[in-house]
Image (cartoon, rainbow, N blue to C red):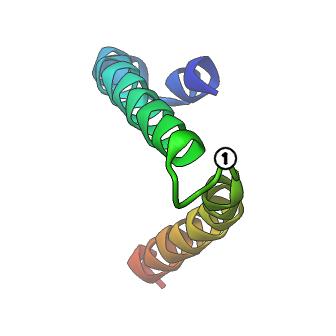
Amino acid sequence: MFYAFAQDISPGHTSKCVGLIGPSSGSSIRGFTRWSASCRHSRAGDGKFAPMILVAGVLPLLAALFCADLAGEARSRRKP
């Protein structure tokens, strides 16, 4: 997805896109890895993956709402 998204950006902004997406994806993956390890090894979780499965199920819904909001803004900006 990283390379596909970078191709959709205009040539003048490709380096900005790659420069922002690369470190942000690395940071989010690092944070998720630490969080999943703490869920896996905590006493309260007892080695269960329920919090991670819940997050994996909610994230697509949040992304769909975000995209719907962006589409609504794009429609409202169109001139009649």
Residue nearest the viewer, comparing 17 with 44: 44
Picture quadrant where residue 30 is located:
top left
Task: From the top left corner, tell me how far across and down residue 56 is, in percent.
Answer: 67, 55
Residue at 57% from the left image edge and 74% from the top image edge? 65
Bin the neighbour count of mark 1 within 10 Å (Cα to Cα): few under 14, some 14-19, many 20 and up.
few
63 left or right of 25?
right
Picture quadrant where residue 53 is located:
bottom right
Residue nearest the viewer, comparing 55 with 39: 39
- Above or below residue 69? Residue 18 is above
Please, what secondary structure does the residue beneath circle 1 have?
loop
| Quadrant housing the N terminus | top right
Residue at 45% from the left image edge and 42% from the top image edge? 35
- Above or below residue 62? Residue 40 is above
Residue at 52% from the left image edge and 53% from the top image edge? 43
The residue beneath circle 1 is 47
Residue at 39% from the left image edge and 19% from the top image edge? 22
Task: From the top left corner, tell me how far across and down residue 74 is, in percent.
Answer: 47, 70
Q: Residue type at mark 1: give it.
A: Gly
Residue nearest the viewer, comparing 79 with 62: 62
Task: From the top left corner, tell me how far across and down residue 70 is, in percent.
Answer: 48, 68
Total numbered labels placed on residues in the image: 1
Hey, which residue is sitting farthest front in the picture? 43
- Above or below residue 51? Residue 1 is above
